Amino acid sequence: MKKLFVLVMCVVLVVTFFSCSKEEKNTSTYEIAMITTSQSSSIDDGAYNQSTWEGLREYAEENGLTYKYYEPREDSTDARLEQIDQAIQSGASVIACCGQEFEPVIYTAQEKYGDKTFLLIDGYPTDDKGNQKTGTNAIGVKFAENELGYLAGYAAVEDGYRSLGFIGDGAAASMKNYGYGFIQGCNDAAEDIGVTVDVNYSYKKDGDTAAKIQKKAETWYEEGTEVIFACGNEVFDSVKAEADIAGAKVIGCGYDRNATSKNVLTSTVKECGIAVQAELAAFYNGVFTGGKNLVLGIAEDAVGLALKTSRFEAFEQESYDALYQSLKSGELKIASSEDAQKVSGLIQKRQLNFVYVTMN
């Protein structure tokens, strides 16, 4: 009996040892990694990081894959690269991240880790000098901001607004696309309804402070502008602050900003979670094609309005669905910044006769 007891205890110890080893391996090795923007902008930011993380987590759990997020110690390229190093040491085969802050990060990481796969959502790998290169082990995904702008403009005019404004955070292609789409949406809605609309149009310039942007919004609201499409975090914050004072409306961009103020009319939304899921599926199904820069839009259900939390009074779900389907089918095609260098060129080329734009 004593020998039998000793034998049983040995078996128990061996099983326990291997069980612990397996558990330790499972909890210390993570196949999919996400690098957040920073500790202060992590997976619960209510914005791009959270959308990307939730999409990644859902895909991983549905497919039995291990996953983890990593938070850089500070808001810098070096800190983000350090977390990529950590993720790879922890077993990551595919690494996802979101935002323009990661463009130089992935530009470097794709070269350093040629046997790993990188998914850059809402950006393309680009170095500090503006050189763009997407390696065969990486993919860059951006969104059709011109379609987002179109939806915002059309909805606002159909909802009854006739004096509108647009302020973009600089004159980069993405901001032009928001603005150009907005003008086209305003024009088409005005034509369909049988009215004309006025649009104040401006880009934030280098050196413009938050106070200066807010002052511009104040002037516009005082002169009769009813709603401003404010693109970019700093621009939105400034315009929203003035909208709260004036009791006017503001449209946000990128993600649902409804909770930030009762004066947010609606928000344009980039579905980062959908984008990361699509690329993870391609990777694990063996059809991932790196070296590409993609633009996802309504055709992929990757952009839209935050309609459920919007504060529209006349623009309804039925109208939105019809508009969305027209864009998805290709019946409606929205010009982008590649189609015109300036607002004046866009207006002339598209013959937008129901919207009157004032550059500020």
Image (tube, rainbow, N blue to C red):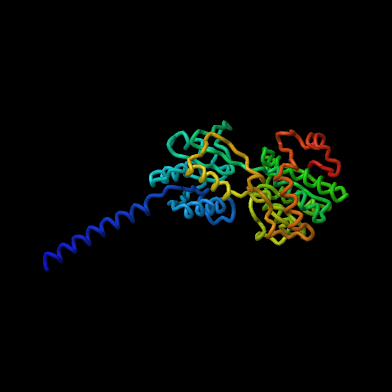
Residue located at (77% from left, 37% from top): 343
Q: As drawn, which residue projects farthest toward the left?
A: 2
Q: As drawn, which residue projects farthest toward the bottom?
A: 1
Q: Is residue 49 left or right of residue 333?
A: left
Q: Is residue 175 left or right of residue 49?
A: right
Tell which of 54 and 325 is nearer to you: 325
Against 323, residue 140 (above or below) is above
Is the C terminus in the top left, top right, bottom left or bottom right quadrant?
top right
Residue 231 in picture, x, y percent from top left: 68, 47
Against 313, residue 69 (above or below) is above
Residue 191 in picture, x, y percent from top left: 85, 46
The number of callouts visible is: 0
Tell which of 308 and 286 is nearer to you: 286
Residue 296 in picture, x, y percent from top left: 63, 43
Tell which of 43 and 303 is nearer to you: 303
Q: Is residue 298 left or right of residue 188?
A: left
* Snapshot quadrant of residue 126: top right
Residue 225 in picture, x, y percent from top left: 81, 52
Is the N terminus in the top left, top right, bottom left or bottom right quadrant?
bottom left
Residue located at (73% from left, 34% from top): 339
